[in-house]
Image (tube, helix red, strand yellow):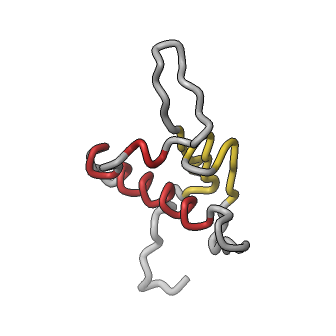
Amino acid sequence: MDAGQARRPSLPRVTELLLSAFAGHRGTTFRLGDLTLLAGPSGTGKTTALRAYEALARLGGGAELGEVFPDPSACVPERARPDAQRRRGFRIGCTAE
């Protein structure tokens, strides 16, 4: 490192995208590196995974739930069964290191 360069602090980064129940994904984990390529045939969920990642980024940036998910029912998996209170929902998350 050059003496004139300040050392940047190490920032956390997302290493996994967890789609427990989101749109067409059930129990899906995407491991993320410095550069991650999502490839596959049309209709396999690549864009949906990117939508989930974007939603988490927006929430992490302070956006309101209603702003990030204006139509939350569109994120609920088709075959999601209601819980004891007859609710159906979706679940996404991430791991950051």
User: In this rendering, would 95 be left or right of 10?
Assistant: right
User: Where is the N terminus found, in terms of image quarters?
Assistant: bottom right
Residue beneath the point at 27% across and 45% down: 66
Nearest the viewer among 61 and 7 is 61
Q: Position of residue 90 (x, y in %)?
A: 51, 38
Up-down: is 41 above or below 51?
below
Q: Position of residue 49 (x, y in %)?
A: 57, 59
Farthest residue to the right: give it. Answer: 40
Residue beneath the point at 61% across and 51% down: 24
**Which corner quadrant of the image does residue 82 belong to?**
top right
Q: Position of residue 85 (x, y in %)?
A: 46, 14
**Which corner quadrant of the image does residue 4 belong to?**
bottom left
Residue beneath the point at 44% across and 52% down: 56
User: In this rendering, would 71 be left or right of 80?
Assistant: left
User: In this rendering, would 11 be left or right of 17?
Assistant: left
Nearest the viewer among 38 and 5 is 38
Q: Position of residue 61 (x, y in %)?
A: 33, 54
Q: How many marks?
A: 0
Farthest residue to the front: give it. Answer: 78
Residue beneath the point at 59% across and 47% down: 95
Up-down: is 92 above or below 89?
below
